Amino acid sequence: MVRMAQAFDELAGDYDDEHHDEVARALLAFSGPVVEDRIADVACGSGAVALAVARTRSRAGTPILAVDLSAGMIRAGRIRAERLGSDQGIDWRVGAAMPLPVTDGGLDVILCASSLHFLGMRALADWRRALRPGGRAGFTLPLASQFRPSGRFAELIAADLPLPETAGDAASLASGAGFVDVGTRVVAVGSRSVVLTVATNPGRA
């Protein structure tokens, strides 16, 4: 975890916010309304998902939990939130994504953009714990044929989570982890493609 935190701390100043904002918008459009749900943005980076959700909610609503191992990324997210006037709508936390710092069944929606391939299959199991029965998880993964991580990031990819080549591959990951009502779609984001996945938690893991 220390190596991963250091790697993303160093990346925080040059993070491609525009690309990740576009991925977040695509994921939110696919996952459906999340107006007053109890939501976590897992491995949030500079907060693309949390910021996109916060813009759709009243300031008096439940804050979105935004968790990341990298203090640098959380710092960058706070700065972005203040600039966009969303600083009251997000609960920023520096910490590990597993286990999520919530009670069992304490969330309605978990969203994870561009990060699950660093977390691995254990994250899906923890999401089932953290979600209420009927709660939803939405995540994105890069296509295996287009993903070319460089340097230390290649070493940080989770070995137990095979990257999908098709939407069906991503659906199999979610259903294999016990989720139901799985929906998937491949979308182009700039020059790259990602698989969007939304699935429902049937009950306890």
Image (cartoon, grey):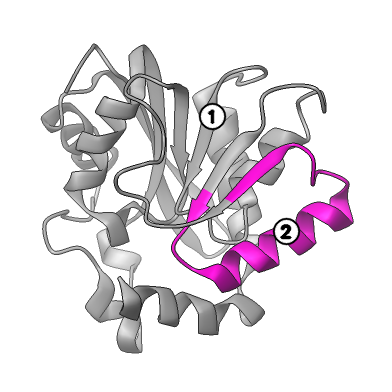
Callout 2: few (<14), some (14-19), or many (20+) C-alpha neighbours within 10 Å? many
Task: Find residue 39 and name its label.
Answer: 1
The structure residue drawn at horizontal position 32% and vertical position 57%, both measured from the top left corner, is 143
Q: Nearer the viewer, residue 146 or 196?
A: 196
- Queried whether the magenta region covers residue 23, the answer comes back as no
Callout 1: few (<14), some (14-19), or many (20+) C-alpha neighbours within 10 Å? many
Q: Nearer the viewer, residue 137 or 189?
A: 137
Name the side, left or right, on which 49 lies relative to 3: right
In 3D space, how far apart are the residues under numbered discs 1 and 2 (Cα atoms)?
17 Å
Name the side, left or right, on which 79 lies relative to 165: right
Name the side, left or right, on which 75 lies relative to 119: right
When asked about the image quadrant of residue 32, the answer is top right
When asked about the image quadrant of residue 204, the answer is top left
- Queried whether the magenta region covers residue 78, the answer comes back as yes
Segment colored magenta: 67-92
The structure residue drawn at horizontal position 74% and vertical position 36%, both measured from the top left corner, is 89
Which element is circle 2 on?
A: helix
* Between discs 1 and 2, the one toward the N terminus: 1
The structure residue drawn at horizontal position 33% and vertical position 77%, both measured from the top left corner, is 2
Q: Quadrant of the C terminus?
A: top left
Q: Amino acid at mark 1?
A: Ile
Task: Find residue 78 and name its label.
Answer: 2
Q: Quadrant of the N terminus?
A: bottom left
Q: Amino acid at mark 2?
A: Arg
Which element is circle 1 on?
A: strand
